[in-house]
Image (cartoon, grey):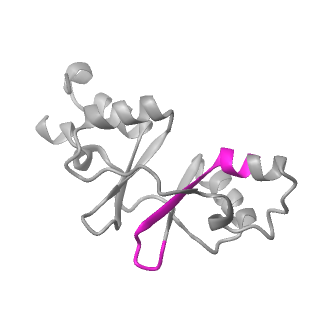
């Protein structure tokens, strides 16, 4: 039960899609649809998180009349996204997701390199995978 109180206990590790800054938004859109996710971390060559690109970022680009085949992730991504580390308490992550109105938060190591993601769904999975779990964090 203690494990599920921190990001490292519930985060998705390695089983997620990322994108680079130079990726075409048209390709990212296909990845979002195919992967059934609503956003991706944008990482540099060293796997440091430099942004997040979400469905809303893409929808805004379309609204602005941008050609998604000629737009890259770095053109429309949210830069300097909120991140947490593996020891961040889940209760803090819940507060971040709620107050910032976001769906996911990247988990990074001390060098800012992506090691996982905690989404609202990961939190729900953590609750349902433990017997009698609804109040495990509070």
Q: Position of residue 20 (x, y in %)?
A: 56, 71
Between 14 and 69, which is closer to the camera in this rendering? 69
Q: Position of residue 126 (x, y in %)?
A: 29, 35
Residue most toward the front? 80
Between 115 and 98, which is closer to the camera in this rendering? 98
The residue under the point 24% across, 65% down is 110
The residue under the point 71% across, 52% down is 58
Q: Position of residue 30 (x, y in %)?
A: 70, 59
Q: Quadrant of the C terminus?
A: top left
Question: Is residue 129 at least partly visible in the picture?
Answer: no
The verdict on residue 54 being magenta is yes
Horizontal arrangement in the rendering, residue 134 relative to residue 60 (left or right): left
**Where 109 sits versus 57, above or below?**
below
**Where 51 sits versus 134, above or below?**
below
The stretch in magenta equals: 44-59
The residue under the point 20% across, 27% down is 137
**Where 120 sits versus 32, above or below?**
above
The verdict on residue 26 being magenta is no
């Amino acid at each position: 039960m203690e494990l599920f109180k921190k990001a490292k206990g519930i985060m998705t590790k390695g089983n997620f899609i990322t994108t680079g800054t130079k990726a075409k938004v048209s390709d990212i859109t296909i990845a979002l649809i195919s992967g059934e996710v609503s956003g991706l971390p944008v990482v540099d060559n060293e796997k440091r998180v430099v942004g997040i690109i979400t469905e809303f970022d893409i929808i805004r680009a379309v609204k602005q009349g941008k050609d998604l085949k000629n737009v890259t992730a770095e053109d429309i991504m949210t830069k300097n996204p909120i991140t947490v580390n593996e020891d961040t308490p889940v209760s803090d992550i819940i507060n971040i997701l709620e107050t910032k109105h976001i769906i996911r938060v990247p988990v990074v190591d001390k060098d800012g390199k992506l090691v996982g993601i905690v989404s609202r769904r990961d939190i729900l999975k953590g609750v349902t995978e433990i017997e009698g779990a609804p109040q495990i964090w509070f």
